[in-house]
Amino acid sequence: MDGYVSHYTNKLDAKGRVSIPAPFRAVLVRDGFDGLYVHPSIDQEALDCGGHALLREIDGLLSGLSPYSEERDLFSTALIGTSEILKVDSEGRTILTETLKSYAGITGEVTFVGHGHKFQIWEPGRFRAHLEEARNRVRDLRRQLSARHAAPDAPPLRSHGARE
Protein backbone atom coordinates (compact mmCIF):
# COMPACT_ATOMS: atom_id res chain seq x y z
CA MET A 1 0.00 0.00 0.00
CA ASP A 2 1.27 3.43 -0.88
CA GLY A 3 -0.74 5.30 1.75
CA TYR A 4 -0.80 5.86 5.48
CA VAL A 5 -0.78 2.60 7.44
CA SER A 6 -0.37 1.56 11.07
CA HIS A 7 -0.49 3.77 14.14
CA TYR A 8 2.10 5.58 16.24
CA THR A 9 1.99 7.53 19.49
CA ASN A 10 4.27 10.54 19.97
CA LYS A 11 4.61 13.21 22.64
CA LEU A 12 4.29 16.93 22.14
CA ASP A 13 7.54 18.63 23.10
CA ALA A 14 7.89 21.66 25.40
CA LYS A 15 7.23 23.99 22.45
CA GLY A 16 4.06 22.11 21.48
CA ARG A 17 5.60 20.41 18.46
CA VAL A 18 4.92 16.81 17.53
CA SER A 19 6.96 14.66 15.20
CA ILE A 20 4.98 13.16 12.33
CA PRO A 21 5.95 9.47 12.05
CA ALA A 22 8.60 8.90 9.37
CA PRO A 23 6.40 6.57 7.27
CA PHE A 24 3.66 9.22 7.21
CA ARG A 25 6.18 11.94 6.29
CA ALA A 26 7.37 9.76 3.42
CA VAL A 27 3.81 9.54 2.06
CA LEU A 28 3.42 13.33 2.34
CA VAL A 29 6.68 13.83 0.43
CA ARG A 30 5.60 11.43 -2.34
CA ASP A 31 2.23 13.20 -2.44
CA GLY A 32 4.01 16.51 -3.07
CA PHE A 33 1.92 18.51 -0.61
CA ASP A 34 3.75 21.38 1.06
CA GLY A 35 2.69 21.15 4.69
CA LEU A 36 -0.10 19.21 6.32
CA TYR A 37 -3.79 19.68 5.50
CA VAL A 38 -5.87 19.19 8.68
CA HIS A 39 -9.56 19.44 9.50
CA PRO A 40 -11.65 18.25 12.44
CA SER A 41 -13.14 14.85 11.64
CA ILE A 42 -16.87 15.01 11.01
CA ASP A 43 -17.44 11.60 12.63
CA GLN A 44 -14.98 11.47 15.53
CA GLU A 45 -13.25 13.69 18.06
CA ALA A 46 -10.07 13.39 16.01
CA LEU A 47 -8.29 15.28 13.25
CA ASP A 48 -8.24 14.19 9.60
CA CYS A 49 -4.88 14.90 7.98
CA GLY A 50 -3.11 14.46 4.69
CA GLY A 51 -2.13 16.12 1.48
CA HIS A 52 -3.28 16.03 -2.12
CA ALA A 53 -4.89 12.57 -1.81
CA LEU A 54 -7.16 13.79 1.00
CA LEU A 55 -7.98 16.97 -0.89
CA ARG A 56 -8.89 14.90 -3.98
CA GLU A 57 -11.29 12.85 -1.85
CA ILE A 58 -12.90 16.03 -0.54
CA ASP A 59 -13.07 17.55 -4.04
CA GLY A 60 -14.64 14.32 -5.34
CA LEU A 61 -17.28 14.40 -2.64
CA LEU A 62 -18.07 18.07 -3.23
CA SER A 63 -18.13 17.79 -7.02
CA GLY A 64 -20.85 15.14 -6.72
CA LEU A 65 -23.13 17.64 -4.99
CA SER A 66 -25.10 20.42 -6.65
CA PRO A 67 -23.02 23.64 -6.57
CA TYR A 68 -25.57 25.69 -4.62
CA SER A 69 -27.09 22.94 -2.52
CA GLU A 70 -27.32 23.01 1.24
CA GLU A 71 -25.50 19.66 1.37
CA ARG A 72 -22.53 21.05 -0.52
CA ASP A 73 -22.42 24.13 1.70
CA LEU A 74 -22.52 21.98 4.82
CA PHE A 75 -19.76 19.64 3.64
CA SER A 76 -17.67 22.60 2.42
CA THR A 77 -17.98 24.29 5.79
CA ALA A 78 -17.10 21.13 7.73
CA LEU A 79 -14.25 19.93 5.50
CA ILE A 80 -12.76 23.11 4.08
CA GLY A 81 -14.02 25.97 6.23
CA THR A 82 -12.61 24.48 9.44
CA SER A 83 -9.37 23.26 7.87
CA GLU A 84 -5.86 24.47 8.49
CA ILE A 85 -2.64 23.99 6.57
CA LEU A 86 0.13 23.40 9.07
CA LYS A 87 3.80 23.85 8.37
CA VAL A 88 6.11 20.86 8.76
CA ASP A 89 9.68 21.73 9.76
CA SER A 90 12.83 20.13 8.37
CA GLU A 91 12.77 17.54 11.17
CA GLY A 92 9.21 16.46 10.37
CA ARG A 93 7.54 18.26 13.26
CA THR A 94 4.39 20.33 13.23
CA ILE A 95 2.55 22.45 15.77
CA LEU A 96 -1.13 21.71 16.28
CA THR A 97 -3.12 24.88 16.90
CA GLU A 98 -5.06 25.30 20.12
CA THR A 99 -8.31 25.01 18.14
CA LEU A 100 -7.30 21.62 16.74
CA LYS A 101 -5.97 20.34 20.07
CA SER A 102 -9.13 21.44 21.85
CA TYR A 103 -11.40 19.72 19.32
CA ALA A 104 -9.55 16.41 19.66
CA GLY A 105 -8.90 16.66 23.41
CA ILE A 106 -5.13 16.57 22.86
CA THR A 107 -2.79 17.55 25.67
CA GLY A 108 0.59 15.81 25.96
CA GLU A 109 0.51 12.92 23.49
CA VAL A 110 -1.09 12.11 20.16
CA THR A 111 -1.74 8.91 18.26
CA PHE A 112 -1.37 8.97 14.48
CA VAL A 113 -3.66 6.45 12.77
CA GLY A 114 -3.31 5.52 9.10
CA HIS A 115 -6.39 5.34 6.88
CA GLY A 116 -4.78 4.84 3.48
CA HIS A 117 -5.49 8.15 1.71
CA LYS A 118 -5.38 10.12 4.99
CA PHE A 119 -4.40 9.74 8.60
CA GLN A 120 -6.03 10.82 11.80
CA ILE A 121 -4.57 12.36 14.93
CA TRP A 122 -6.19 11.25 18.18
CA GLU A 123 -5.81 11.76 21.88
CA PRO A 124 -4.42 8.29 22.78
CA GLY A 125 -7.14 7.32 25.29
CA ARG A 126 -9.89 8.27 22.87
CA PHE A 127 -8.19 6.25 20.15
CA ARG A 128 -7.99 3.15 22.36
CA ALA A 129 -11.73 3.41 23.07
CA HIS A 130 -12.47 3.98 19.38
CA LEU A 131 -10.30 1.02 18.38
CA GLU A 132 -12.13 -1.26 20.81
CA GLU A 133 -15.50 -0.12 19.45
CA ALA A 134 -14.27 -0.57 15.86
CA ARG A 135 -13.09 -4.11 16.58
CA ASN A 136 -16.41 -5.02 18.17
CA ARG A 137 -18.38 -3.59 15.26
CA VAL A 138 -16.16 -5.34 12.71
CA ARG A 139 -16.75 -8.64 14.53
CA ASP A 140 -20.51 -8.01 14.31
CA LEU A 141 -20.25 -7.12 10.62
CA ARG A 142 -18.21 -10.25 9.96
CA ARG A 143 -20.90 -12.37 11.63
CA GLN A 144 -23.57 -10.65 9.53
CA LEU A 145 -21.56 -11.21 6.35
CA SER A 146 -21.00 -14.86 7.24
CA ALA A 147 -24.71 -15.33 7.91
CA ARG A 148 -25.58 -13.53 4.69
CA HIS A 149 -23.17 -15.70 2.73
CA ALA A 150 -24.79 -18.79 4.24
CA ALA A 151 -28.29 -17.42 3.45
CA PRO A 152 -28.10 -15.40 0.20
CA ASP A 153 -31.73 -14.25 0.46
CA ALA A 154 -31.10 -12.53 3.81
CA PRO A 155 -32.02 -8.82 4.19
CA PRO A 156 -29.28 -6.20 3.64
CA LEU A 157 -26.76 -5.40 6.37
CA ARG A 158 -27.73 -2.85 8.99
CA SER A 159 -25.59 0.26 9.14
CA HIS A 160 -24.57 1.89 12.42
CA GLY A 161 -23.56 5.39 13.33
CA ALA A 162 -23.47 8.83 11.77
CA ARG A 163 -22.93 7.66 8.22
CA GLU A 164 -26.40 6.12 7.84
Image: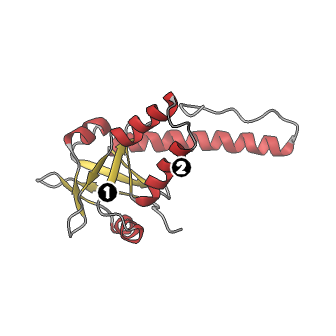
Mark 1: secondary structure: strand
Residue at x-position 54% and y-position 68%: 1
Q: Amino acid at mark 2?
A: Gly
Is 32 placed above or below 74 here?
Answer: below
Identify which residue, 126 or 36, lies in the foreground.
36
Question: Disc 1 marks which amino acid?
Answer: Leu
In this picture, is 13 found above or below 141?
below
Confirm whether residue 24 shows in the render.
yes
Where is residue 95 shown, x and y percent of the image?
20, 53
Q: Are marks 1 and 2 in contact (CB under 8 Å)?
A: no
Counting from the top left corner in percent of width and height, residue 105 is at 28, 37
Q: Is residue 43 visible?
A: no
Which residue corresponds to mark 2? 60
* Quarter of image, res 92: bottom left
Query: What residue did someone put label 1 on?
Result: 36
Horizontal and vertical percent position of residue 119: 42, 54
In the drawing, does residue 44 fall left or right of residue 37?
right
74 with respect to 15 (left or right): right
Front-most of 109 and 38? 38
Q: Which residue occupies 42% across, 59% down?
A: 52
Q: Residue at x 79, y 41 (%)?
A: 147
Q: Residue 94 vs residue 46: left or right?
A: left
**Rendered position, 135 above or below 55:** above
